[in-house]
Image (tube, rainbow, N blue to C red):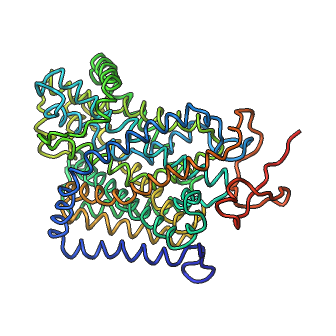
Amino acid sequence: MEISNIGIFKGMNKKMSILSIFLILLSVAITGYFPLKSANYLKDIREFLNPFLEWYYVLLVAFLLAFMIWLGMGRYRNVRLGGDLEQPEFTFFSWVSMLFAAGTGVGILFWSVAQPIIQFQNNPFTGTAMTPEAAITGMSLSFFHWGLNGWAIFSFIALTMAYFSFRHGYPLTIRSALYPIFGRKVDGVLGDFVDILAVFGTVFGIATTLGLGVEQMNAGLKEVLNIKSSLFLQLGVMSAIMIIATISVVSGVNKGVKLLSIGNFWLSIIVLLFLLVFGPTQYLIGVTVEATGHYIQNIVRLTFHTNVTHDTNWQSVWTVFFWGWWIAWSPFVGMFIARISRGRTFGEFVAGVLLTPTLITIVWIGLFGGTALYEELFLGKDIVAAVNNDISSALFVMLENLEVGILGEIMSFLMIVLIATYLITSANAGTLVITTILSAGSTTPPVVHRVLWGIILTLLTGVLILAGGLETLQAAVITAALPFSVIIIIMIAGLLKSLSLESTPARSGNEQLSAREPWILDKDVGEEPTIMDEFNPNIKKLKEPEYK
């Protein structure tokens, strides 16, 4: 990889940066100049791909879930993402806060009320719609789309990148996972192409999330402050979010991103406790427990559902969209999780990234979606009509229906703040990841490029909103995810080949070394070839210090 030493592209891969910027700005220009044609074109592509993606994404995601469980529980569970004695860089609480905020914070806020209500009305797994039984099914389907399967995608990308980077000294980029398959060819055009695909998927994944979040903030401002909803307001809110996000990302992971993520986490806990205390407590606990059981009982059936009869569009509207969204986001979230996971074993990593966010998601959807379902079933609030009228307003209508006076207004305002902070966290983490890819894995990419990509993300999100809102965003992310899914398959082969050369799985003993960047040589640490030199003999490696 050629890293420029001078000019505006100093510290960056100049060719990749220019090409990535050109492609994204070209997309912005075409979409902005031909919004209706672009929206229709994206929808046509989605409809053409749906029959293929209904089984292809299903098989890919099913394999990744099984594969990650095997990595976390099998013979490699004690392999460490770093040296055998390296300790984790972040505490467990900080680690979980950051990976959850970056992974699903904005999306789950948008769908936590709307999705259970929509599934409650119509899904292929319930005989009679809008009944208490349909409520359980609707909740479990929401758990399915936000649970183990999706986090298997994120965790695979993150573990693979962290393994090759922190254990074998390769740059923190997608291409590093392909060294076992292609060798030094990855340093050239092939690697550039792979990383550009990762950038492309990441940009559209983030733009989709930002678009959804901005729509929801717009609805919240209308409900709470009676500010009239408009495209101008959405664009203004988005610009303000991106300015704050860019300032935050300039401060780095250990400051801005970490502090915002922890703040999000605590604010989320406050909101959940509010619903648990002032909502229908007994029903919320009961429906969450029962829906969780339903989810566990049916996860295999749901994982392999392909809509083979094509008698409904549910699979393409929901599962294909969500798996495409997770895949498009995976380079971004995967790299971010890898960046904060140095020093953890495979077992710790898989348990943390698969189970912890899934449990948090179940509690979140259980309380938010459960409250909305209770209002519909037992209070006659007709939240179904509110969701069908405007998905983005569903959360605030649910809070208003609790009828707790000033407390409800305060919580609605806090939800606007929470959406904003999750948007900022996702945006600044995404900007950091894009610039990390384009700077050959540097964990401190140039500030000017972090700012530049913040501006580019703002422009792309704006034109996608102008082009048609939610449906256009969904079509764009599904289309952008498909090419990267092929890279995921090659990464699986690369990881398996590398693991087969691990002479003995690392022990799980006591960590004694502080986390460090493995590609930065220590004057007190000698150099010695490792198993990865078979793939790239020119890269410098570190010898693990001997401890008595």
Left or right: 60 as drawn, with respect to 142:
right
Which percent across, then down, holds residue 348?
59, 35
Return the residue nearer the eye: 255 or 502: 502
Name the quarter where the N terminus is drawn. bottom right
Residue 507 drawn at (x, y percent):
71, 34
State the count of labels: 0
Q: Quadrant of the C terminus?
A: top right
Left or right of 178 on screen, residue 539: right
Quadrant assignment, res 378: top left
Residue toward you, 424 or 502:
502
Q: Residue at x 11, y 32 (%)?
A: 382
Compared to residue 52, the image places residue 8 above or below, namely below
Residue at 72% from the left image edge and 61% from the top image edge: 520
Does any portion of residue 304 appear in the rendered image? yes
| Left or right placement of residue 21 versus residue 208 in this view | right
Horizontal and vertical percent position of residue 542: 76, 56
Quarter-of-image position of residue 537 = bottom right
Residue 418 seen from this side: no
Residue 436: where, in percent of width, then height? 54, 63
Pick the front one: 478 or 90: 478
